[in-house]
Amino acid sequence: MTIRLTVQRERWWNHVTYVADTIDGLVPVVKGNGYGFGRSGLAIAGSRLSSVLAVGTVHELDGLLQLDGIAPSTVFIVLTPNLHADVSDVPTDRVVLTVGNDQHVDALRGWDGRVIVKLPSAMRRYGADMGLVGRAQRAGLRTVGVAIHPPLAGDDDEHVAQITSMLPGIDPSLDVWVSHLAPTTYERLPTSHRFRLRLGTYLWLGDREAIHLGADVLDRRSVRAGDTAGYRLHTVEHDGHLVMIG
């Protein structure tokens, strides 16, 4: 086996449940490969914390909606817009999609479901102005919230300032979905709106001492500064060793 993730289960779960108990509006994220734990297993764990879970793409819903261990009432938020996905079989009572521009809205026209409208942030990844909320509604989509996705770069003050600067233009009846905020930063958001915090890395991998990533070492060779190595013959900067893993 090349790569192994070893987990101190009790310690890991104690961290996860502590985070969940202290965050009002938590939405566990189980996208991709489930942060190394497997998406299905993590979805079952996440459903014990919240009735709402988030996945990355509409394709990641496959196998989760009818998964044993997840309540039939669990709602899945799809974080990434997709112009080409077939949503004809996506259950409107279980899934909320995301739109970030007029093309996303047009792609969903005729789908009688709920959406979250992604607003622009400093990341410049998707996002449109608040006018997209009305355009989505006129297209027959039920808009239940807006999303603000600040970058990882910057400090807590910058993230809070970016979010709060957009609040005056947001209808307080819409939930505001945010990401990339530490729990203590999330607590600083004003009470003028209802917020939901999508949390993945900090929730599942926040206690680094509870997990260990290991791999098989296949070979180890001495090198000196100035040697070249690898496919691209990069120059080795210091004396040391090349380690071939997995």
Image (tube, helix red, strand yellow):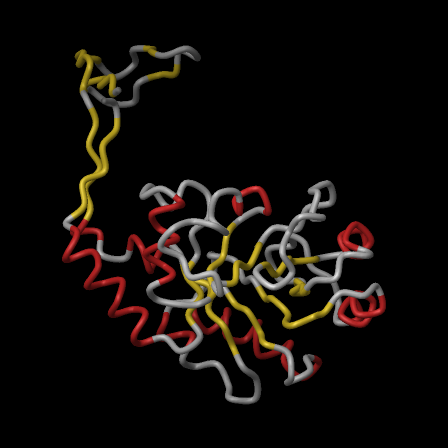
Q: In front: 68, or 60?
A: 68
Q: Is residue 85 left or right of residue 238?
A: right
Q: Nearer the viewer, residue 151 or 54?
A: 54
**Is residue 207 shown left or right of residue 159?**
left
Identify whether 125 is placed above or below 86. Answer: below
Nearer to me, 76 or 102: 76
Q: Which x, y percent locates residue 98? A: 65, 58
Indicate the quadrant where residue 35 lies: top left
On screen, 112 above or below 239? below
Q: Report the residue that reaches farthest toward the bottom.
A: 192
**Residue 119 seen anywhere in this rendered image of the structure:** no
Who's the residue at 26% across and 28% down the image?
A: 3
Image coords of residue 112 (percent x, y): 74, 62
The answer to whether residue 87 of the structure is visible from this angle is yes
Which residue is rendered at x = 22% and y = 14% of the image? 224
User: Where does residue 209 sit, x and y in percent of width and height?
Assistant: 16, 51
Rendered image quadrant of residue 214? top left
